[in-house]
């Protein structure tokens, strides 16, 4: 298991080696029917559960890719993780989540 944290260290653990910067990205397309429903929900002041679900899914894909790259470098943790969200494509029809951090070995 790879420990993932946004902090520069892991409390109670000592960083013994730095393996390099790792990154993970996920790009998901938004379904037109979900878009229409989300617009209606936003209009009446409700939360858009479909967008929230897609955001969670994209974030998890990006973090999974980040952890996989760290493992390939021989790391057992990633510190200083930064997560960014971006809307892409014509009519903002795609969502990109990117995560980056430093792969390290902790003991």
Image: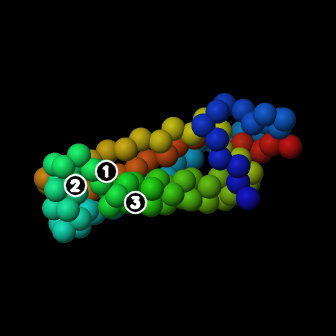
Q: Which residue is mark 2?
A: 41
Q: CA distance from mark 2 to mark 1?
A: 6 Å
Upstream in sequence: badge 2 or badge 1:
2
Element type where label 1 sits in the image: loop
**Label 2: how many residues lie within 10 Å, few (<14), some (14-19) or many (20+)?**
some
Q: Position of residue 74 (x, y in %)?
A: 73, 54
The quadrant of the rendering that contains the C terminus is: top right
Q: Nearer the viewer, mark 2 or mark 3?
A: 2
Q: Are marks 3 and 1 in contact (CB under 8 Å)?
A: no
Q: Are marks 2 and 3 in contact (CB under 8 Å)?
A: no
Q: CA distance from mark 3 to mark 1?
A: 11 Å
Q: Position of residue 88 (x, y in %)?
A: 24, 50
Q: Which residue is mark 3?
A: 53
Q: Which residue is mark 1?
A: 47
Side of 9 relative to 86 (left or right): right
The quadrant of the rendering that contains the N terminus is: bottom right
Upstream in sequence: badge 3 or badge 1:
1
Residue depicted at 77% across the width and 45% down the height? 105
């Amino acid at each position: 298991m790879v420990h993932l944290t946004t902090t520069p260290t892991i409390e109670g653990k000592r960083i013994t080696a730095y393996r390099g910067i790792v990154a993970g990205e996920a790009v998901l397309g938004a379904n037109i029917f979900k878009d229409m429903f989300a617009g209606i929900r936003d209009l009446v002041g409700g939360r858009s559960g479909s967008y929230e679900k897609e955001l969670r899914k994209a974030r998890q894909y990006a973090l999974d890719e980040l952890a996989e790259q760290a493992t390939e470098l021989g790391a057992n943790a990633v510190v200083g993780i930064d997560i960014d969200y971006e809307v892409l494509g014509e009519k903002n029809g795609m969502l990109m989540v990117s995560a980056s951090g430093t792969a390290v070995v902790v003991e």
